[in-house]
Image (tube, rainbow, N blue to C red):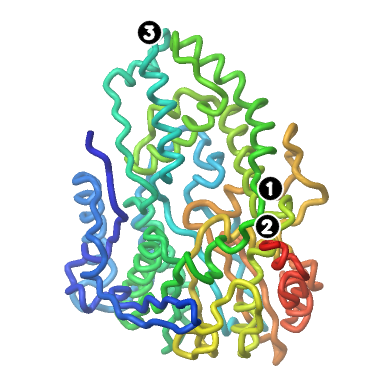
Amino acid sequence: MVRWKSSFSIQFLFGFPPDVLPGNGYKRLEEEDDDEALLSLLSAHSLRRRRASVWGMIAFSLVLIWCTCAFLGPSGASPSEFFPVTPKIRFPGHAKHTWAMYSPYFPAAEYKNPPSQCKVNQVNIIHRHGARFPTSDAGERISSAVQKLQNATLFRDVRLHFLRHYTYDLGVADLIPFGAAQSYDSGQEAFLRYKDVIGSSTPFVRASSAARVVDTATNWTSGFFHASGGSSAPTLNLILQETLNDTLDDNMCPNAGSGDEQTDIWQAIYAVSAAARLNKAASGANLTVADVTNLISLCAFDTLAKEEASPFCDLFDSSDFNGFDYYGDLNKYYGTGYGENLGPVQGVGYINELIARLTDSPVRDNTQTNRTLDSDPSTFPLGRAMYADFSHDNQMIAIYSAIGLFRQKADLDPMQPDSRLTWVVSRLVPFSGRLVTERLDCNGETFVRMLVDDALQDLNFCGANDDGLCTLDAFVASQWYATNDGAGDFERCFS
């Protein structure tokens, strides 16, 4: 059986020499037990070569070659328009917005320009990796559910006939071509939106060390470079090891719980009818409600990997997809969100780094930060116009919750969804989702505002006005939980 492997990088498709591409040289810093930092420079040649399907590479190469010509032309002039390279997939029905954390990025709202009297002077981006293959554990569960269907003695529904010749061939956890394109487009968009803010400066870029996160970061820098017409060439400056102190990964709270109890309750409600329907259509399959959840997730993964609607999507209706979507909402809310007592504290370190950047002052934190790195101007510089950090969905959920974004009036009910909820994971952390914090000067006074997937956030916790602006001082004061190192919660992670 052929299985897709490795993350996908689009940088080499432009035909530029590897040593001149942005993102192909970066620092990997490790903190030893004695808190000494080890600095090493890695080139693109040290990254393992990414493999994708031949058809995917050919199709994507042609798109990028066309975009190169359209963008730069023979003169290499700076582009003035956004030419997205993310493939247009004919998604099944409304499914792509009901895949919870496996939904592809889409703007949750139209970007709203700041008031005319305000000028953005700093941009902070924290960005989820692009679309990927299932993780190892998820892939095993998906493969098991598929095998149950294929072991059926009789198919009574023509929509199942494809299974007679189907082979599960998805790789494990790595970035896929669609995710690489998402990342590249995000880099383009960042330059084109904020080029006046950036000026002659260069973004400082960090990534958590998972391959899919690193590759997302380097594809983002390539998109940024290309949109600038070559005038700005950011690199991946720093990789934070996930086995050590890392503010971009949720790896430092061993006592934290999970959302399994709540998701199990909801799964036993929403997936019952689909399990019964499929078991009737596939005699002897003996699918469980958990198998239904795994097969719906395969609809998403298979569609994004193959860049065409998966036949697995046809096995489910809108009610099934809506149920799965809420399953994801519960998973994140009770995982690292407000529903887990030790969820928000996992985002505190990043917030303290954000405050340091916004205030141009040293980091003050005793939680997840790497003090060696954050005290070194070469690995945590201040005074930059743009910072871009690349992370995971669970960590971003913790950060949202620690900040105070998307707070609900009551905890999510594992037995009954509420259509009025603003906690919708497909809008919070889709593949390639991002939180952008803008610092602005408005008639000599400093303000901040936040956007999640382009949707302007109501920062009511710091007295924001109708434009979503609150003063920098008020914002910092509102983050007392972070500036107090989680108010004792971080210690509870270990005791």
Residue 311 in the image, given as x and y percentages of width and height: 38, 27
Q: Position of residue 147 (x, y in %)?
A: 38, 23
> Circle 1 sits on which residue?
334
Q: Which residue is mark 2?
A: 343
Q: Secondary structure at mark 3?
A: loop
Label 1 packing within 10 angstroms: few (<14), some (14-19), many (20+): many
In front here: 201 or 40? 40
What is the three-letter code of the residue carrying label 1? Tyr
Q: Residue at x 59, y 64 (%)?
A: 252
Q: Amino acid at mark 2?
A: Gly
Is 158 in front, or is 284?
284
In the rendered structure, which disc, 3 or 1, sits on the residue that comes first in sequence? 3
First in sequence: mark 1 vs mark 2: 1
Label 1, label 2: how far apart the Cα atoms are? 8 Å
Q: Position of residue 435 (x, y in %)?
A: 58, 65
Label drawn at residue 153 = 3
| Left or right: 135 in relation to 259 | left
- CA neighbours of label 2 inside 10 A, class few (<14), some (14 to 19), many (20+): many
Viewport quadrant of the C terminus = bottom right
**CB atoms at circles 1 and 2 under 8 Å apart?**
yes
Q: Nearer the viewer, residue 245 or 15?
A: 245
Image quadrant for the N terminus?
Answer: top left
